[in-house]
Image (spheres, rainbow, N blue to C red):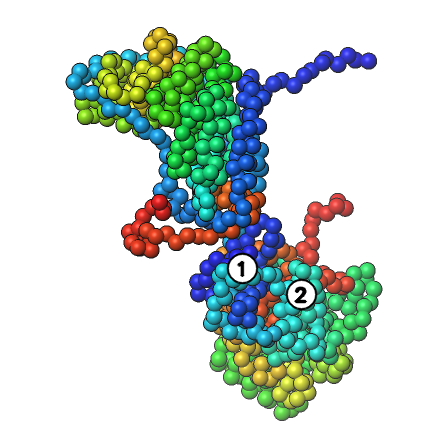
Amino acid sequence: MIEQLPYATTPKYNFPNAVQDLQLPQNFIELSLKSMKNLNLEQFHPIETNLFNSITENTDLTEPTLLNYSPPTLRSIPLKPLPQPTTITAIDVSNIKLGETETGILTAIRAAIVWRQSRQYRYLRLGPFPFHITEQNRREIYCLFRQYYFQTPPKDMVGPNLLNMQNRISNLLERWLQMSISTSSHDNIILWDGSLTAGTPDNPTKVLSQLLEIARNRLNTVLAFTKTTTLRLGGHRLTDLTTKTPPPRLIQINHYPLHSSTPIRFLGNIYIAKLTNGGCSFRLDIDKNIPSEQGIAATQKLLGNDLLLQGYPETLRLAHIYSTFTANEVIGIQRFIAQTYGLKIVTRPNLRRLLFGPYGKGPEA
Amino acid sequence: MRLYRKEGNTIQILSFPTEDIEKGEYLLIQDSKRNRSLVIQVIDIQFANIPGILEELLRNSTDDKHIYGENLDPLEVAPHITYIQDARMLVCKIRGTIQNGKLSINTAWLPSRSQSNIKKLPVASLLAQAKISKSRPINLGETRELSSITIDAHMLDGKLNIVTGKKETGKSHLAKLLVLGLIDYGAPVVVLDLNGEYTRLGFSSNDEKNEYHKKVRVLTPGDNFKITLAQMNLRVMMNILFHALDLPGTSAREFRRIWRFLKNRDTLTMHELGETIRNRQCNLHVRDALYSRYYSLLNSGFFTDNHAEATSLEENFHSMQSGGALIINLQDISSIDRQVVVEFMLGKLVELLTQRKLRAVFLFAEEAHLYLRETYWDDIVTRMRHFGVFTTFVTNQPNTIRENIYRQADNIFLFNFTNEHDLEAVSRAAKVDAETVKSVARDLLPHHCLVLGKVVKDFPIVVKVKALDIQTMGQTRLFFTDDN
């Protein structure tokens, strides 16, 4: 007998076992299903997919106005890529309005998490999860979400109006995923889509602070990229500010004053990141409670570990691509809902088109 | 299936992956409110233009080497998305209308887009609706629904037919099927067999004599097919000299004199013809020209002075009164001799038909451009039809048949073509729109043909040609076989 060597299959990559680690709660799926159960052979007015391109996924841009009386100082920080192996994790969530029923709106939510490690990308897509939001169930859904993920007492909660619900649910899912990733990963760079601005109904300061703290405790660094910021300094859009330092570089904005009356708080140091030559500039928020050197080092690790196209991290770009809905998917989900719940599809006339003909752009409000 | 749009005589139908539709099939758009149905034929199948499909494909086109991942889809929405992605657009042509159970070619109405019901229309039902006569059925094969398809021999009678397709798609096989079908109904058939493919029609695949054995006669020029000059009339001989042997006009006039001189003396033989030319007092160049043509005729082996070995076409046709085929085997003879034989055959056929010794004849011409002179095409298609010569051209080079011939073709049996040039040539056939020809013919499988014309009442139908238990002889001879 020739002794056989006990060969074992080599694990493909050493990525975190995403699905098990994340443990997508049954409640979330149940919540989706429960919301859909109240569909009872209703009429369904799907959104027009030919207008799909004009439908943008809403982002809640509740940005405060910076005061002008004491101009903030700008500090240019040149960056050098740090090739020290580090896992980059990006999270993004998309939501889309699928149409309307007689009693509410139908939306779908999908999340994507992308990891970059050892020059490989891995993604996990969660969803799509359809939701039927009505006046009757909107508060219930919202409270359940918040209660489940952030243990916020429901009595504090006033459910948002119907139109904002899809963004709220989407935002809550995103926060939950950020929480899960922060909890399950260690010494990672976590990329968020958006800012570290807190104090809005969507982003309570307590919740966001808690999130950042968990990430910090696990030695993770959160880098939040904002593609379009409404923040202005001296009348100029923040991302239009330039220095003579060549990219890659960060421009740190110090001492940006806020109205004392505003509940809005910046939980991160605000930078303008121009990470590649010829690329775009982005607002970059880095957790205030970590030393700024650590934040800058994290950005340099990002440069050394991820691809940057147009100055934007590829991992975050992929997270957006994998979570976003294509028109084809919207039709597919509409079909799924119509078939599964026996909805009768009725196309509502587009009043804008009816009234203004070719000048009636965009979907019906 | 859903009716999507109509433009001209083209209708687009949205179809889903679960609906198994192929090119060439017929659909029925039933408008129950108007109690009418539109008959349409699928000529092309495309992917439906789904919004966002490009983004979807790009997103999913990543390779496992660089990006891999998983989808957590607990509600199983993904199959619905892929179902939409695979939606197809059937491009169809309107072929007619069924109203009160009657099929008409009325295409001047439009069914309801929202209320119409679309279903497959089996070819058998269509042909039943079209009331295709089956008094003399010839079984061609089967449709995609596996129903047998027969045409009526009546629809080949007095008609001009074209069988065309690229090499090795089954053209000659279908031609043989038609030949045997016509023989079954007592028709006399003449086959100008360029490659000796029809020579074994009287034998089954296991080399035994089949039911047609006595009805098929193979005539090989120079072997068992020889003629005397007495069987030939001057006009046919002059055609041979002019068109096959390029005899100049001055020499032709001298030849006529010689011919008449010999005929009057009742000594019209090859030997006498040679002697007369040799001793003729005429211009030296004329005599040389005549002498060189005489030797061409002599060397062809087609002419004889021995009446015993001469073939009588009259007798051959007489013995085929209950149907039969005369196979003129042109396989091993030179192109000039081929033209000589064909000139004689066509002249003789017209002569017999004019004299009413023959009622009509079905002529099958394989790759006729190789032996048929330019002026004969129109002659065959127009003049000879009135005498009773009903031709079927078989060719793999459709551009060798002139456009005006296609225009006058009553039936076209079209096999696979992939070459755009060939498709362009065939699509000029007036029987059906060019789009149908180009789109359907491009995807025809071997032994499948698109039948166009009167045999199918102008409803183009794709047929899988049935197999024949005969020795086909049409295969390409190969060097590399399993035996060596």
Residue B451's x, y, as percent?
60, 66
**Most foreground residue, B154 or B335:** B154
Front: mark 1 or 2: 1
Say if mark 1 contacts mark 2, CB within 8 Å.
Answer: no
- Residue A46 showing in the rendered view: yes
- Mark 2 Cα-neighbour bin, 10 Å: few <14, some 14–19, many ≥20: many
Residue A314's x, y, as percent?
42, 25
Q: Earlier in the sequence, mark 1 or mark 2?
A: 1
Q: Which element carries disc 2, helix, strand or loop?
A: helix
The correct choice, above or below, for B407 with respect to B52 in the image is: below
In percent of the image, x 67 and y 55: which residue is there? Answer: B476
- Mark 1 Cα-neighbour bin, 10 Å: few <14, some 14–19, many ≥20: many
In percent of the image, x 62 and y 92: which residue is there? Answer: B264
Residue B98's x, y, as percent?
57, 72
**Residue type highlighted by circle 1:** Ile
Residue B216's x, y, as percent?
75, 72
In percent of the image, x 65 and y 72: which residue is there? Answer: B128
**Residue type highlighted by circle 2:** Leu
Is residue B408 shown left or right of residue A275? right
* Chain name for mark 1: B
Image-quadrant location for residue A80: top left
Distance from Cα at disc 1 to Cα at disc 2: 23 Å
Q: Which element carries disc 1, helix, strand or loop?
A: strand
Where does label 1 land, which residue?
B43
Q: Where's the C terminus of chain B, which quadrant?
A: top right
The correct choice, above or below, for A189 with respect to B33 in the image is: above
**Most foreground residue, A153 or A176:** A153
Where does label 2 land, which residue?
B174
* Chain name for mark 2: B
**Most foreground residue, B399 or A78:** A78
In percent of the image, x 50 and y 66: which residue is there? Answer: B111
Is residue B81 shown left or right of residue B355? left
